[in-house]
Amino acid sequence: MGFMAPETATEAPTNPPANKATRGRGRPRAFDEDEVLDALVGLFWEKGFEAASLCDIVETAGLNKSSLYNTFGSKDEVFARVLERYMEMRSAMFAEAMAGDGGLEHLGAYFSMLREEAGSDG
């Protein structure tokens, strides 16, 4: 077999390591998607969809354009994911408020928090 040593030529091929066989394409993500979405909630809350530029989104996310597109897609898709994240957070807060024994008192506190948040600059 040409250049191979005789003992190497007769060896059976080895299987790739298990982690190589099960790993997906590309490198694993080095960021937390929820943290990125949480940061983008603030951006869209402050600027709105139209005024938030792609540069603003990339800067706030702390990602490069290709990572942003590969993970979240277009600006419309980023906004949809941000909106989903915002609604998940608010639903969890609502469930937590209603989990206690306070009933209407907890519900009132939840809506007061939402009213304050909506009127704030944040």
Image (spheres, rainbow, N blue to C red):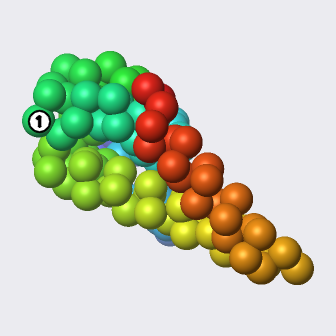
Residue that label 1 marks: 50
Q: Nearer the viewer, residue 106 or 29?
A: 106
Q: How many marks?
A: 1
The quadrant holding residue 110 is bottom right
Q: Residue at x 70, y 59 (%)?
A: 109
Answer above or below: position of 32 versus 121. Answer: below
Q: Nearer the viewer, residue 119 or 44?
A: 119
Q: Residue at x 37, y 24 (%)?
A: 60
Answer above or below: position of 111 versus 34. Answer: below
Q: Secondary structure at mark 1?
A: helix
Q: Nearer the viewer, residue 109 or 82?
A: 109
Answer above or below: position of 65 versus 118. Answer: above
Residue 74 image point, x, y percent: 14, 47
Left/right placement of residue 46 relative to residue 90 reads left
Label 1 crowd bin: few (<14), some (14–19), many (20+), radius 10 Å? few
Residue 19 image point, x, y percent: 57, 59
Residue 111 image point, x, y percent: 58, 60
Residue 42 image point, x, y percent: 42, 34
Q: Residue furthest right?
A: 101
Left/right placement of residue 97 relative to residue 54 reads right
Left/right placement of residue 97 relative to residue 17 reads right
Answer above or below: position of 105 versus 116. Answer: below
Q: Residue at x 55, y 42 (%)?
A: 116
Q: Residue at x 35, y 37 (%)?
A: 45
Left/right placement of residue 113 relative to residue 20 reads right
Q: Amino acid at mark 1?
A: Glu
| Residue 38 visible, this orientation | no
| Residue 88 visible, this orientation | yes
